[in-house]
Image: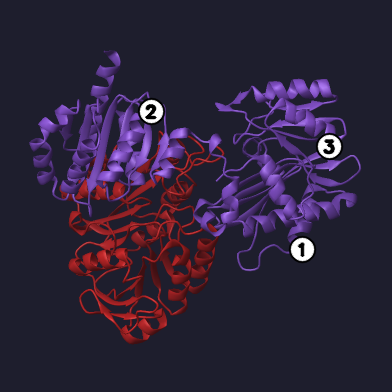
Chain colours: A purple, B red
Amino acid sequence: MKIHEYQAKELLAQYKVPTPKGQVATTVGEAEKIASDLMCWPLVVKAQVHVGGRGKAGGVKVVKDMAALKGAAESILNLSIKGIKVRKVLIEPAVDIKQEIYLGLILDRSTQRPVIMACAEGGVEIEELAVTNPDAILKLPIPPTYGLRPHHVREVATFLRIPETAKKSFNAIMGGLVKAFYEKDCSLAEVNPLVITGLGDAIACDAKINFDDNALYKHPELESLRDTGEEEPLEVLASEKKLNYVKLEGKIGCIVNGAGLAMGTMDIVKHFGGEPANFLDIGGGAKAEQVADALKLITADPNVNTIFFNIFGGIVRCDLVAQGILQALDSMDKFPYPIVIRLSGTNEEIAKQILDENKGKVKSKGTEMTLMPTMAEGARKAVEISKSRAAA
Amino acid sequence: MAVLVDDNTRLLIQGITGREGQFHGGQMQAYGTNVVAGVTPGKGGTKTLENVPVFNTVREAVAATKCNATIIYVPAAFAADAALEAMEAGIKLVIIITEGVPTLEMMTVYHEARRSGVVVVGPNCPGVITPGKAKCGIMPGHIHKPGRVGLISRSGTLTYEIVWELTRAGIGQSTCIGIGGDPIVGTSHLDALKLFNDDPETDAVVMIGEIGGNAEEDAARWVKANMKKPVVGFIAGLTAPPGKRMGHAGAIISGGSGTGQEKIRVLNECGIKVGEIPDQIPALVKAQLK
């Protein structure tokens, strides 16, 4: 789960990480109120969205007076960054920047441990730096048995050449970041930039935190930080229905049992010249209710013109899946989309028979079903139908 | 003897009285797997499935039945603890089927397993099957066929799809290892390749990967330097958008790394033939075995 910068800063502040004291506004009026309460200039106005690249998109502005603040808040609240509408801005005192540093913690898959990443050139995306100047990044794995120790903090501070005056506040940032990472089950926690101020202190000027979805059940207090307004509406709907769904841009709606096969299905649609409309894993069972939810979800996407079921019947029997599809259609008045079904594995013959016997019913719903024996033939057929519908 | 499981496997089921434990326990017994014990805290002293004794703790189960492998179906919040309990009781093969185990907890399990010489498979995996000998997992047994091709995969149904293609093409499998779809798994592609490389009953390996992380690339580089047997690959998720989790917790392209295109490039560079669609795998395997 992703959260906003201001939420990440509030969380880190609970762990004694020094941050600028700002507030969030959703309107220009609120922004003015916050500015007059803060009583200090210059201020910085920052778009709060779950995507990177805000600065380049004009989503961060430093302002010196109320007129400039109003203008900045208004223009940023009218922005869309990488397709996401800006609905909130963070207003906080601008920091006197002497040096910008990157400090982050990620869960490293290849070493199976959290790794501290540090770089004396902050303020840029670390992924870019890792490509352009990998030697400038320190990667320090945290030992799984005994965790963060004082010598780690010294090693990082030495690498970054943290000035003596900033040591105490730097230690607070690094200690708080690591503690928050473990206690809140983060998958990523970064301060970028960590700023050394003109007065010689260290302060966390921007922060980003992602939580491990598998561990969210342990932290009910984090639920309120979820901002579904930042997510694709159909994906929010899917997660309410407990379906694993990711929206794509194509026309062929894919319904698949299993995540790996669902990815494979998107790829094979593309392989045969089509464009998948989504990733959707309905799980191993493929019960009628799930199938119905899946069909409704997929057809809520106006781009979709064809449905492709790709079901491998292993433990789940194909005949039950076929019945599930028919029952799902029963629960709908009309379903004006052609359906290509590939069902193979256990009881595949019985499934075909069931679908054959119900051709009339299927037709009465305004749809047509084509049964194909393999994944490749199913995908090819779905692409062919989708293309002819797009041309019509 | 293929790898990991065979007819010497004496299997314990943790969470045997739960819905999944009951269903898949029955399926495993029907396949011929020697299920010798179950653990469900509070239900010790009873029997379930076909005459399987249930114990309160793994230690009791080991003492009474000499079980030498365990499969874990307990809910996500308790799965890591179940794995640690099994390791402490001396079990050397721990298969975690459960999906949704917190990553930091899995990290503890991973390092404890390495320290104590235990093989952990999973979590979030279909398990391990040596066709004709032992099925320790949730995969459909009947699609498999005994043979000499090893299979390694991060996913469930995609693996069944490819196994089914192989079986229909007359290519049997030595062992199929579902390593799991999470960011941290007990056995990596590389670990599994090493097992197959040393197995006299395996002639070739199919490695099925997907977007996220760089375990496939690490494995491919090892293959180039050390593998004595041919490897055929398949990578899922070429059309996946960056930053989105594709069902599996580990299937996410982050910061531009872990893309399918990059994985295929490295696999090809290391001499591994990669199928573009699953149907092509049997022919690629056959070509390698000639």
In the picture, measured across the screen, residue B39 lies left or right of residue A136, that is left
- Residue annotated with mark 3: A95
Q: What's the CA distance linking mark 3 and mark 2?
A: 45 Å
Q: Which mark is residue A301?
A: 2
Residue A21, image x, y percentages: 79, 42
Amino acid at circle 3: Val
Q: Which chain is disc 1 placed on?
A: A
Number of marks present in the image shown: 3
Asked whether B167 or A5 is in front, the reply is: A5
- Nearer the viewer's eye, disc 3 or disc 2? 2
Q: In this figure, which residue is indicated by the disc labeled 1? A: A150
The earlier-in-sequence mark between 2 and 1 is 1
Q: Residues within 10 Å of mark 2 (few under 14, many from 20)?
A: some
Q: How packed is label 1: few (under 14 Cα within 10 Å), some, or many (20 or more)?
A: few
Q: Are marks 3 and 2 on the same chain?
A: yes
Distance between the alpha carbons at the discs numbered 2 and 1: 53 Å
